[in-house]
Image (tube, rainbow, N blue to C red):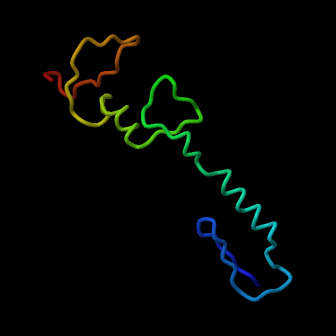
Amino acid sequence: MLKWGMIGALILVTGTASANIVSETYVTNIKNALNQSKENVSNKVTTLNAESTDDHYPSARAVNTALGDKVSLNADETINGVKTFVDAPIVPTPPLPTE
């Protein structure tokens, strides 16, 4: 029985040859499928802006830059400036009446 595995685009076939030989067409089809699923490097962007499309994908630095000045969900921080809410924010009830 043949066993095979893929490492990147390299296909390894081990075992004894029998009627289950991997055909060249099969290998070509696997390579084509791998090439179609790769990210297109020309679509990589280093900034997020109004020109970004669904085909673009951002670098890690672009994501960090775009989200770096947003309000944290878990950390203590001071928020300056006037904030207007369309709906009233949810504020927790203090556990003691004096808080």
User: Residue drawn at (34%, 34%), measured in percent from left and top?
Assistant: 65
Q: x and y percent of residue 89 in the render?
A: 34, 18
Q: x and y percent of residue 83 in the render?
A: 30, 13
- Count of picture labels: 0
User: Residue drawn at (43%, 37%), measured in percent from left and top?
Assistant: 46
20 relative position to 56: left or right = right
Q: x and y percent of residue 47 in the render?
A: 42, 33
Which quadrant: the C terminus?
top left
User: Residue drawn at (40%, 37%), measured in percent from left and top?
Assistant: 62
Q: Nearer the viewer, residue 11 or 79?
A: 11
Which quadrant: the N terminus?
bottom right
Q: Residue furthest right?
A: 19
Q: Nearer the viewer, residue 77 or 4?
A: 4
Q: Residue furthest bottom?
A: 16
Q: Quadrant of residue 49?
A: top left
5 relative position to 43: left or right = right
Where 64 falls versus 98 (above or below)?
Answer: below
Q: Nearer the viewer, residue 91 or 50?
A: 50
Q: Quadrant of residue 96?
A: top left
User: Residue drawn at (63%, 65%), measured in percent from left and top?
Assistant: 9
30 relative position to 50: left or right = right
